[in-house]
Image (cartoon, rainbow, N blue to C red):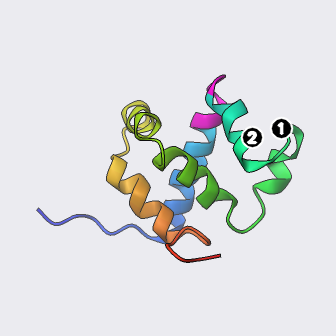
Amino acid sequence: MARRTMNREEAEMLAVRALSFVAADPELLPRFLSLSGIDAAAVRDAAREPGFLAGVLRFVTDHEPTLLRFAEETGVSPQDAVDALGLLPFGGHGEG
């Protein structure tokens, strides 16, 4: 069975879902903020920066238990999350 190809807009929407997932989790959000160096009050501004959405997806995809929970709670396949990361600015291997 052939896999569906995702475009950048769909990748961005998936990353926004990942941000909502992280923001709603009282354990993940502080960890994400700490690792990213972003203050909670600055998330909205940071979200406008190139690479922010890729950073959110990388945070989710780099930790398999988090990725699997995100996939289960959102109905997104883990592979789609990984594929979306590669479509975002600074999300590809060797970028930025």
Quadrant hosting residue 88: bottom right
| Residue kind at label 2, given as amino acid type | Leu
Residue 56's spot in the image, x, y percent? 61, 50
Tell me the residue at 51%/72% (across/down): 92
Please identify, in this view, whether the residue under mark 1 or under mark 2 is nearer the observer: 2
Tell me where residue 28 appears, x and y as whole percent. Answer: 62, 31
**Can you say which quadrant of the picture contains the N terminus?**
bottom left
What amino acid type is highlighted by mark number 1? Answer: Ala
Question: Residue at the spot x=88%, y=39% of the render?
Answer: 41
Please state, as top left, top right, bottom left or bottom right, where the C terminus lies in the image. bottom right
Badge 1 or badge 2: first in the primary sequence:
2
Quarter of the image where one finds residue 18: top right
- Determine which of the numbered discs, if any, sits on residue 88 in the image: none
Q: Position of residue 40 (x, y in %)?
A: 83, 38
Disc 1 from disc 2: Cα separation: 7 Å
Q: Is mark 1 on a helix, strand or loop?
A: helix
Magenta stretch: includes residue 76: no
Looking at the image, residue 21 sits to the left or right of residue 36; the answer is left
The residue that label 2 is drawn on is 33
Does residue 52 sit above or below 42 in this rendering?
below
Numbered range of the magenta stretch: 21-27
Instruction: Identify the residue at image location x=56%, y=60%.
Output: 12
Q: Number of numbered discs present? A: 2
Q: Residue at the top extreme?
A: 26
State yes or no: discs 1 and 2 in contact (Cβ < 8 Å): yes
Residue 40 tag number: 1
Q: Which residue is drawn at 40% across and 63% down?
A: 83
